Image: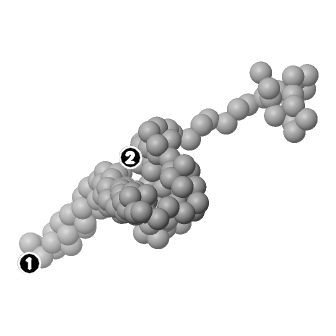
């Protein structure tokens, strides 16, 4: 009979331990979700870029060239520009996909710095603080030094 009296206390302490463990694992779970989502989106974006490049190559290898194909070829990004565009596309699509899953009103928002690093973009730039009475200001009111 005395064992039954201690059972609710044991269950309550186990529940508290489980809650504490899940709360401590929450940041890593969010990190894993962000990493998995970005990797999935990278596959989609890389496939879309590769398909676009293949279509453009096929259009340029045909005997009939149009001004539209030539214009597309000249506008097609190359090198670091292509990498920057691809990273931006991965970031945007990952943000769209993650915003559907990570909508917690009481918790912290999505870690945009981690998302930027995973997507291959630079982290968001810090905001500039400027003295209101500084004479070195642009016409829009922002600091210029």
Question: Is 118 above or below relative to 89?
Answer: above
For the residue pair 136 and 32, the one nearer the viewer reads as 136
Q: Of the numbered discs in the image, which one, if any, rests on residue 95?
A: none
Lateral position of residue 96 relative to residue 130, left or right: left
Q: Which residue is drawn at 9% across and 72% down?
A: 3
Q: Which residue is drawn at 60% across and 37% down?
A: 125
- Does the image show residue 49? no
Q: Say which element carries label 1.
A: loop
> Are the residues flagged by discs 1 and 2 in contact, CB closer than 8 Å?
no
Question: Is 13 above or below relative to 28?
Answer: below
For the residue pair 118 and 47, the one nearer the viewer reads as 47
Q: Of the numbered discs in the image, which one, if any, rests on residue 118?
A: 2
Ranked by sequence position, the earlier of labels 1 and 2 is: 1
- Does the image show residue 101? yes
Q: Where is residue 48 in the image (x, y as percent from the top left)?
A: 39, 62
Q: Say which element carries label 2.
A: helix
Quarter-of-image position of residue 127 = top right
Q: Counting other residues with Cα less than 10 Å from the Cα at mark 2, is it few (<14), some (14-19), or many (20 or more)?
A: many
Q: Where is residue 106 in the image (x, y as percent from the top left)?
A: 52, 63
Lateral position of residue 80 relative to residue 134, left or right: left
For the residue pair 20 and 31, the one nearer the viewer reads as 31
Q: Which residue is drawn at 56% across and 50% down?
A: 75
Query: Which part of the image, by quadrant, shows the C terminus?
Result: top right
Lateral position of residue 6 relative to residue 143, left or right: left
Q: Name the residue under label 1.
A: 1
Q: Position of residue 69 (x, y in %)?
A: 52, 60
């Amino acid at each position: 009979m005395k064992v039954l009296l201690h059972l609710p206390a044991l269950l309550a302490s186990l529940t508290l331990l489980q809650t504490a463990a899940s709360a401590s694992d929450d940041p890593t779970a969010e990190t894993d979700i962000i990493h998995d989502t970005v990797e999935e989106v990278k596959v989609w974006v890389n496939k879309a870029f590769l398909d676009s490049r293949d279509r453009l190559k096929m259009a340029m290898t045909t005997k009939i060239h149009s001004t539209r194909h030539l214009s597309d070829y000249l506008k097609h990004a190359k090198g670091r520009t292509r990498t920057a565009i691809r990273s931006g596309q991965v970031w945007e699509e990952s943000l769209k996909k993650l915003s559907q899953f990570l909508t917690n009103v009481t918790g912290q928002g999505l870690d945009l710095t981690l998302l930027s690093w995973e997507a291959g973009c630079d982290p968001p730039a810090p905001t500039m603080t400027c003295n209101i009475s500084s004479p070195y200001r642009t016409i829009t009111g922002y600091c210029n030094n």
